[in-house]
Image (tube, helix red, strand yellow):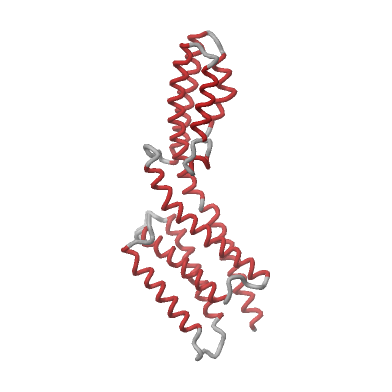
Amino acid sequence: MRAVNRSSWPVWVGAGAAFAALMVWHRSPLLSYTPNFTTGYMLMGLVVFLAIYSGRKRLSMLPLGKASVWLTLHLAGGVLALALFWVHIEAIWPLGASERALAALFYGVCISGAVGYGLQLWLPGRLAHAGQEIIYERIPAELATIRAQVEKEILEAAKESGSDTFGREYLQTLAWYFARPRFFWSHVFGGQRAEHWLQRHLNTIGRYLTEAERTHLARIAELGVEKRRADVQYAMQALLKRWTIFHVPLAAAMLTLAVWHLILVHVFAR
């Protein structure tokens, strides 16, 4: 979902015009008082508006407007908030300890938001080329099915050969791979660690098996490829869902500290 496209240009033009008007007002020689109170309240209101986006995502079933429009407003509002923040503190980095803590949280929210938007642009295209999409909530069941099929092949091989060699080798190596999603970051960045790991261990196990057992090993290799596809889906979909683990708590902490900052300013301004 893109927030920067032809249909979104009015929002960006409006945000730019609002910032230009703010700069003209802020630098006006006619002002006889410090404008920091006003810019602070503007920034606080904008941050609250940006926080509403999280609630909008949780109430997607309600007719509250298109998600693409909300995303555009959220991104444009975030850029405007960053510019307004610099106008408000009249610097990139403030001097006071509490102000620095607030600035650190604010920058953390901005950076995590930019990273999250970048992931939303990058990962869907990767998912489209990663094979048939699996619904995220169904991935554990898919992995369990694959693991059951692998163990079935191991048991059938043991029955046919009367040997437990295959089973022991599986427990020592391949069981780790099929137990849960593996090689998370390699899959995210398009690496081949999983493929190389699986092929190396399959080749090693194959040296100790009979011809009949190697038939089952070949089937397990096919299941390993299916497992890798599911792991790729898991890695990219999990990253899309989990980046908010950093963004939302940072935003909540920033908003809390901003309210405390507002209280302190009014107390000491008296």
Q: Position of residue 48 (x, y in %)?
A: 49, 67
Residue drawn 54% across the image and 91% down it? 32
Against 93, residue 63 (above or below) is above
Q: In the visual, does 173 lie left or right of 64? A: right
* Direction from residue 94 to residue 35 in the image, left or right: left
Up-down relation of residue 64 to residue 29 (above or below): above
Is residue 30 toward the left or the right of residue 99 in the image?
A: left
Q: Nearer the viewer, residue 74 or 204?
A: 204
Q: Residue at x 53, y 33 (%)?
A: 180
Residue 14, percent across and down?
38, 73
Number of marks in the rendered image:
0
Q: Quadrant of residue 95?
A: bottom right
> Which quarter of the rendering shows the N terminus?
bottom left
Q: Residue at x 46, y 49 (%)?
A: 240
Depth check: 201 or 127 in front? 201
Q: Position of residue 131 (x, y in %)?
A: 38, 37
- Asked if residue 94 lies left or right of residue 227, the reply is right
Q: Position of residue 172 (x, y in %)?
A: 59, 23
Q: Residue furthest right?
A: 97
In the picture, which quadrant includes the C terminus? Answer: bottom right
